[in-house]
Image (tube, helix red, strand yellow):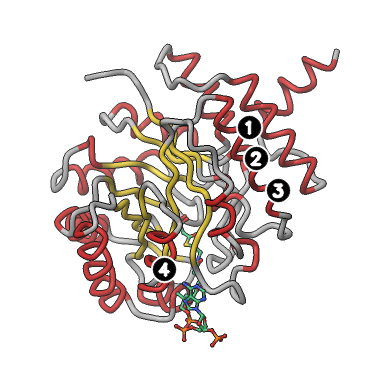
Amino acid sequence: MSDRVHLVEVGPRDGLQGETPLPLATRATLIEKLLASGCKQIEVGSFVNPKRVPQMADTDKLFAQLPTNTTARFSALAANSRGLQQAIDANADAVALFTATSDTFCLNNIGMDRQQSLEQFSELASHAKSLDLPVRGYVSTTIACPYEGDTDPADVAELAYSLYRAGCYQISLGDTIGVGTPNKIKRMLQAVLAEIPANAVAVHFHDTYGQALANVCVALEMGIRTVDASVAGLGGCPYAPGASGNLASEELIFLLDGLGMPSGVELPLLVEAGQFISNALNKPPQSRVNLALSAKNSI
Ligand SMILES: CC(C)(COP(=O)([O-])OP(=O)([O-])OC[C@H]1O[C@@H](n2cnc3c(N)ncnc32)[C@H](O)[C@@H]1OP(=O)([O-])[O-])[C@@H](O)C(=O)NCCC(=O)NCCSC(=O)C[C@@](C)(O)CC(=O)[O-]
């Protein structure tokens, strides 16, 4: 099995969706800096109701500003058929669709229950596939739901298998509120990997309780080679009370460099991207690696 690990950089979407809305030029510069650091898969933004998530307004205009001389894959998150059409019109390289194990989370997030969300997911995936648009699927609340409590790993496996059958090239498993610990993550991943191959699985951990990196180690040991992370540790779903930032991309790359697992991402340039976006938001990076390396460089 290859040691190469793929970072899916979700900072421009998951990272920014709960922050103060930023000008389009700042969002575009962040993406340029992430590209310069070697990121090859970037979730650019989302096509959802801008009254509910104003930070992601004008994602179509952002797509129009992206460089075309790159092999990077630019994806967009879409919540419904209108969002999918917006992603198609924007020439996104891939669309990310999402659902969750919990009815209450689905209702709060997208106004429909899990079953309705799954039905919509299949319809949207089938439409995207008919246009040769690759589909990435997210399953949220894979460890616990902020409203309903602990999640049964069998539920995650069943949902992940449904998304795989619906044609997703990859299923990203979200610990939306970051309560997973290595033993819980292992049980959840064992259930999922009994249904779908490891190369179709990604992990998406929030770092609310500081467990994200330990959980990544479990996923790597189990053969998973795609990890979602957000530069400067920004992030969190606005409809998941208690959720904090994603695993910081800087933490992930520092770990991978230390393990000798190539990612193609250059840490100093990633740190620069993290500094840039943190300055734009007027707050320090939520990444200890970023803080440590920036302090070292300023000596
Ligand atoms: C799903 C909807 C859109 C349904 O929207 P809705 O408000 O529930 O219902 P609606 O369909 O009746 O639409 C209401 C208004 O939204 C507009 N609208 C409807 N669709 C669109 C669209 N695509 N683009 C622009 N506008 C749209 C629509 O036109 C209408 O406008 P109005 O008549 O009030 O002026 C809404 O509930 C929504 O936007 N929810 C937010 C979902 C979201 O972005 N959540 C965060 C991302 S998920 C996440 O973070 C978790 C993840 C993926 O990272 C993994 C993890 O960590 O677990």
Nearer-N-terminus badge (3/1)? 3
- Element carrying mark 1: helix
Under mark 2, the amino acid is: Leu
- Element carrying mark 2: helix
Q: Which residue is mark 3?
A: 25
Q: Nearer the viewer, mark 3 or mark 1?
A: 3
Q: Position of residue 52 (x, y in %)?
A: 59, 74
* Residue positioned 37% across, 80% down in the render: 112
Nearer-N-terminus badge (4/3)? 3
Q: Position of residue 266 (x, y in %)?
A: 56, 19
Does the beta carbon at disc 4 come under 8 Å from ligand 1?
yes
Q: CA distance from mark 2 to mark 1?
A: 5 Å
Q: Is residue 253 visible?
A: yes
Q: CA distance from mark 3 to mark 1?
A: 12 Å
Q: Is disc 2 in contact with disc 1, using a CB cutoff of under 8 Å? A: yes
* Residue positioned 23% across, 41% down in the render: 200
* Residue positioned 37% across, 55% down in the render: 96
Q: CA distance from mark 1 to mark 4?
A: 27 Å
- Element carrying mark 3: helix
Residue most toward the right? 299
* Residue positioned 54% across, 51% down in the render: 64
Q: Residues within 10 Å of mark 1 (few under 14, many from 20)?
A: some
Q: Nearer the viewer, mark 3 or mark 2?
A: 3
